[in-house]
Amino acid sequence: MACHAKPAQLEPLPATIPPTLPTAQPEPTATSNATPRPTETTIPLPTLSPTALPVVRTTPPTLMLHRSSANFDAVQFLREMIVFIQEKNLHVITYQDIQENPAITVTEQGKLFIITIDDIYLRYPMHESVLEMISLLQEAGYPAVLGIVTESDYAYPETAAKLKELSAQGWEIASHTDNHRNLGEMERVSPRAIYLEVNDSLVKIEAAVGIRPITLILPEGQMVNDGKQLRRAQLTWIVGINGGIEYDASRNLLYVGRDGPYGSAQETFENMRKRFGF
């Protein structure tokens, strides 16, 4: 912000104004060559209006990961992906971060990145490869969004403790539904059951971790046609796969897309650059 000079202090007015006196003739004075001092005036500062932000905003490029399998080493893939993120000096955030600072996807467009890890079951110990990915991200100073499947009322103590620890560090704990049900298929059979499938998961996560998620990661990436039951569960961010490269910030239910591994880490990164335009 530009600095403005402090206006000169004016002499205080007298407490009482004397009555008007006859005008006296001025006495002759010596001629002065001094330049007359200009009269100081206070110029009002312009009123600055807030920057108008577009309603339709670009979704940050978002990576979808799962635990390692016999055919895919998720840990090594993430290790290589982190190198590209660091080289581009991208700011890794969560959906919760956008919720707290909605303008960030405008002010830092093209500089953001989101990492999600799915299929973390609350009732079981975390898979070794998931713990390794978490360690890699912690070393890099990056948070991630963790998709939690709840299933039963039981929470494995070490898993719940780890999720609490990560949540305190700025990681986001998201719902991945109660039973990992495809909500698109469920909607065709029993639309009202969607609320129970989602809300049960939110309640169980809150009981185990101490926070109620605002983000739902869709099993199999399938979005519903009517978001009424998701709004009823007080969700905000719905994370699928297809589409979702933009979202309408004026809505109370925000659908965003993401990409899974596509060949090598380099190929995946380039594919994400093309899709999300960063």
Image (cartoon, rainbow, N blue to C red):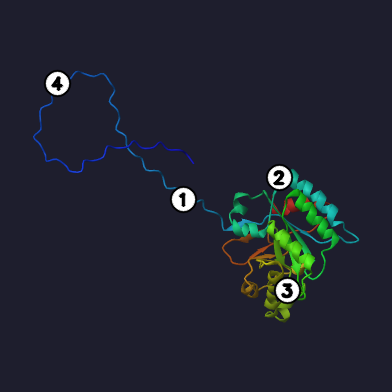
Q: Name the residue carrying label 1.
A: 49
Q: Name the residue carrying label 2.
A: 89
Q: Secondary structure at mark 4?
A: loop
Which residue is the extreme one toward the right?
Answer: 70
Q: Name the residue carrying label 4.
A: 28
Label 4 vs label 2: CA separation? 76 Å
Dot 2 or dot 1, earlier in sequence: 1
For the point 49% across and 51% down, the residue is 50
Dot 4 or dot 1, earlier in sequence: 4
Judged by depth in the image, the label closer to the viewer, 4 or 1, is 4
Label 2 vs label 1: CA separation? 31 Å
Does residue 67 appear left or right of residue 275 in this picture? Answer: right
Q: Position of residue 259 (x, y in %)?
A: 76, 58
Label 4 vs label 1: CA separation? 55 Å
Label 3 vs label 4: CA separation? 98 Å
Label 2 vs label 3: CA separation? 36 Å
Q: Name the residue carrying label 3.
A: 183
Q: Are marks 4 and 1 in contact (CB under 8 Å)?
A: no
Q: Position of residue 110 (x, y in %)?
A: 66, 49
Disc 1 packing (10 Å; few <14; some 14–19; many ≥20) = few
Q: Are marks 2 and 3 in contact (CB under 8 Å)?
A: no
Q: Secondary structure at mark 3?
A: helix
Dot 4 or dot 2, earlier in sequence: 4
For the point 10% across and 33% down, the residue is 23
Q: Amino acid at mark 3?
A: Leu
Q: Secondary structure at mark 2?
A: loop
Dot 3 or dot 1, earlier in sequence: 1
Quadrant hosting residue 127:
bottom right
